[in-house]
Image (spheres, grey):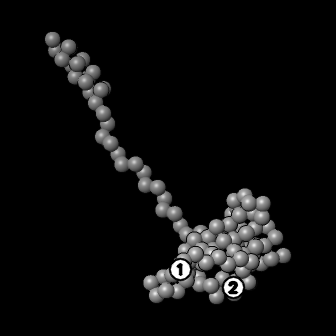
Amino acid sequence: MRRILIASSLFLAGCATRPQQPPPQAPQPTAPQGGVRRLEGLDTADLVARFGRPALQVREGTSLKLQFRGRSCVLDAYLYPNQTGVLRVTHVDTRSTSGADTDQASCISALEYPS
């Protein structure tokens, strides 16, 4: 009888679940050294000073889209009014001249320093 009790205890212990450990924390993303973070918050004058005259300006309601084109890529900067009404960059899209996605930092650098 004692053996049955010990065997059943061991059997039940083997079926027990282990205590759940919290999943490991994902590393917090860091702001890229360049790329879109360098443009967020800039106003129209800042963009023109950095990239020159935009190739395209599109107004929609209170927002503004400025497009800058280079040899290898196109950058679209989307500006929306902040609390004081000043238009500031809130989003940036970049693509190659063929339309494929491209690295934002590389495109920004290519537009800042054209060869």
Can residue 58 be seen by looking at this rendering?
yes
The correct choice, above or below, for 22 with respect to 9 in the image is below
The correct choice, above or below, for 89 with respect to 27 in the image is below
Residue type beneath disc 1: Thr
Task: Compare marks 1 and 2 and give the one earlier in the sequence.
Answer: 2
Q: Which x, y percent locates residue 29?
A: 52, 63
Say left or right for 88 vs 93.
left
Can residue 89 be seen by looking at this rendering?
no
Say left or right for 14 vs 24.
left
For label 2, the SS is: helix
Q: Residue at x 54, y 77 (%)?
A: 61
Mark 1 — residue?
62
Residue lying farthest to the front in this orientation: 61
Say left or right for 43 vs 108.
left
Q: Residue at x 16, y 15 (%)?
A: 2
For label 1, the SS is: loop
Q: In whole angstroms, how far apart are the C-alphas of marks 1 and 2?
A: 19 Å
Mark 2 — residue?
48
Residue type beneath disc 2: Val
Q: Which x, y percent locates residue 101?
A: 69, 59
> Crowding near pointer 1: few (<14 within 10 Å), some, many (20+)?
few
Q: Determine which quarter of the picture holds residue 36.
A: bottom right
